[in-house]
Amino acid sequence: MGQTERGTGRWTFRPPAWTASPASVAILLLLAVLVALSVGCDDLEEQSEDLPSLATGDDDDGEFVLDGNGAYDVSEPWDYPYYLVIGGALSETLSLATVSGPGEISVANDVQLTGSAINQMQTHDGALYAVCSLSHSVIRYDTSSLAIRSETSLGVGTNPLEIAFADDGRAFVSNFVTNDMRVFDLGEGDDPLSVIDMPKDDLPRYEGAGETWARPGSIRYFDGAVFMALSNLDEQFRAGGPGVVAVVDADGQALVDTIEMTGGNTTALHLDRDARRLYAMSTGTYDNDEGFIGDGRVDVIDVDSRAVVDTVEIGGAPFTMVQNPRGVAYLGNGQHAVVLSFDTETMEVREPIDIRDGDDGDGLGLSYASGIATDGNGYLYVVDFNHDELVVIDTFNGDRVIARVTVNDGPVPIGFIR
């Protein structure tokens, strides 16, 4: 059960329950982490030839826009061109798509290397950061060229999944294997400033469930607090109880609250800063024979009261949410390559968007909507993990698929530079 060579190959087994999350690739290879803890990115070589030169206007560094973090402005139309960065978890590369107009996309595949199992891309202070789960590191890229500027080890065997930055530049990292949040100053070496352990014995459990572990996933910083999704999984990596969102005080670097969800296997968070809402996605129940049964939920959290104020029974196995300029939510889906959707004002579930092109992949459950982003012009960009495909959807005109292009191997995180 190992990673294939860069740019080639496919996994040839059905993923277990916990693969349909933003951490799908990283967790799928979890056993490889435990067997080969010495693996690192020390030998990562920069692919220096043919790096892109991005026309991002007067600001040479451009502006990187993360999928799903709610930090960018889509209230006004965007000017063309802009760029979409795509992280390939199997190819261990970045691809770059140039968006010249509605449905007009050209792709330069495999333009830069990543570490093993890229799981998330994030921005801070004009740089692009990539969390590489199986090489336990964060790589910093120049946003004007995607050149590698530095790499920080987050600790062998931690299996980091996501990163969030505080206003002062401290980096908060969720770690799936060690069940903790670690705080770093990425400019001051590899040692963490602190390690914040997540609950274990106090986690809620379903009746008859045995021991569970937090298994942290998605993480968001807002207004002095760090919110982190806890999957709450048993030894078989299935939901042993309702998911939980942990709340950490960023200044005190201590756990101050936990919020119980209505769904199981809570893996992803989306922050709507304007509405002061945090959306928590739970992928739901997994069956050994059938896979995800389609009982996914989205819990809506008021960030001030830290309470669940609404729940959307969205179905599927939801994760990685974005909102278009009209306030419509679109979500990645670990059950199938079908985009889920609901209205964030009424909380009404909308018709899902099937992006499968005639089949559901190879029969192994690997055809799913693994990454998603939206622009200021009403276009939605979705990647299909198994088909190595980027699909463009016009959300202002009936959620129509208007373009398909081939991208790097096993695409997961995507986001804009403009």
Image (cartoon, rainbow, N blue to C red):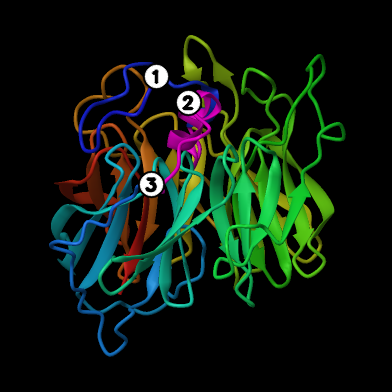
Residue 333 coordinates in the image, percent (x, y)? 44, 37
Above or below: residue 160 compared with residue 50 = above
Residue segment shown in magenta: 20-42
Which one is earlier in the sequence, the residue at label 2 or at label 1? 1
Query: On the image, numbered disc 1 is attached to which residue?
Result: 1
Mark 1 vs mark 3, CA separation in Å: 18 Å
Asked if the residue under mark 1 is in contact with the one under mark 2, i.e. CB atoms within 8 Å, the reply is yes
Corner quadrant of residue 273: bottom right
Query: On the image, numbered disc 3 is attached to which residue?
Result: 115
Mark 2 vs mark 1, CA separation in Å: 7 Å
Give the residue drawn at x 64%, y 64%.
Answer: 221
Can residue 340 be seen in this snapshot?
no
Residue 151 coordinates in the image, percent (x, y)? 44, 59
Give the residue drawn at x 44%, y 75%.
Answer: 73
**289 with respect to 78 (left or right):** right
Residue 229 coordinates in the image, percent (x, y)? 66, 46
Task: State which quarter of the image contains the N terminus.
Answer: top left
User: What's the amino acid at mark 2?
Assistant: Ala
Residue 302 coordinates in the image, percent (x, y)? 73, 60
**384 with respect to 248 (left or right):** left
Give the residue drawn at x 70%, y 22%.
Answer: 234
- Specify whether residue 251 is painted magenta: no
User: What's the amino acid at mark 1?
Assistant: Met
Mark 2 vs mark 3, CA separation in Å: 15 Å
Query: On the image, numbered disc 2 is attached to which residue?
Result: 32
Above or below: residue 177 compared with residue 128 = above
Which one is earlier in the sequence, the residue at label 2 or at label 3? 2
